[in-house]
Amino acid sequence: MAVTDLEDVKLYCKIDFDFEDQMLEEMIEAAEDEICFAIGNDVTPQDLAKYAKFTLAVKKQVKEEYEHRGLSADTQRHGLANGVLNIIHQLRTRRELDDHKKNESQSHVLP
């Protein structure tokens, strides 16, 4: 189940109709999985839901996939939308820092 809201994605993509909602939900879930796996193979969308940049990256990737769906193999495209790779690097670093802080605080707890 996707953590990114369908209505937020539709607003970002400027989509006013409902007949492609199922396809959009599939794109959202696929984008979340792709971004999570790029950060680490043990990362889930629920792990990253607290970061606004994760939601932004998902929206960017869904918009890219939505706007370029059905294009032939002749079209040269990058795997990730513009800016998503930078967000992935930032989220990876932020997650590592958060994990480090959590481990540090747990090691300072007296028994």
Image (tube, grey):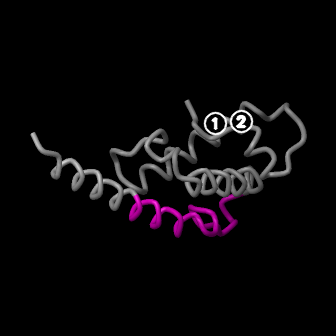
Q: Amino acid at mark 2?
A: Met
Residue corresponding to mark 1: 26
Residue at 74% of width from left, 56% of height from top?
A: 68
Q: Are marks 1 and 2 in contact (CB under 8 Å)?
A: yes
Residue 69 image point, x, y percent: 73, 51
* Residue 10: quadrant of the picture: top right
Specify the segment rendered in magenta: 72-94
Residue at 63% of width from left, 63% of height from top?
A: 81
Q: Residue furthest left?
A: 111
Q: CA distance from mark 1 to mark 2?
A: 5 Å
- The image's mark for residue 23 is 2
Query: Does dot 1 land on a helix, a strand or a loop?
Result: helix
Q: Residues within 10 Å of mark 1 (few under 14, many from 20)?
A: some
- Location of the C terminus by quadrant is top left
- Location of the N terminus by quadrant is top right
**Magenta includes 1?**
no
Between residue 72 and residue 95, name the one nearer to us. Answer: 95
Residue 106 image point, x, y percent: 21, 47
Q: Residues within 10 Å of mark 2 (few under 14, many from 20)?
A: few
Judged left or right of residue 78, residue 90 is left
* Residue 15: quadrant of the picture: top right
Q: Is residue 75 above or below residue 69?
A: below
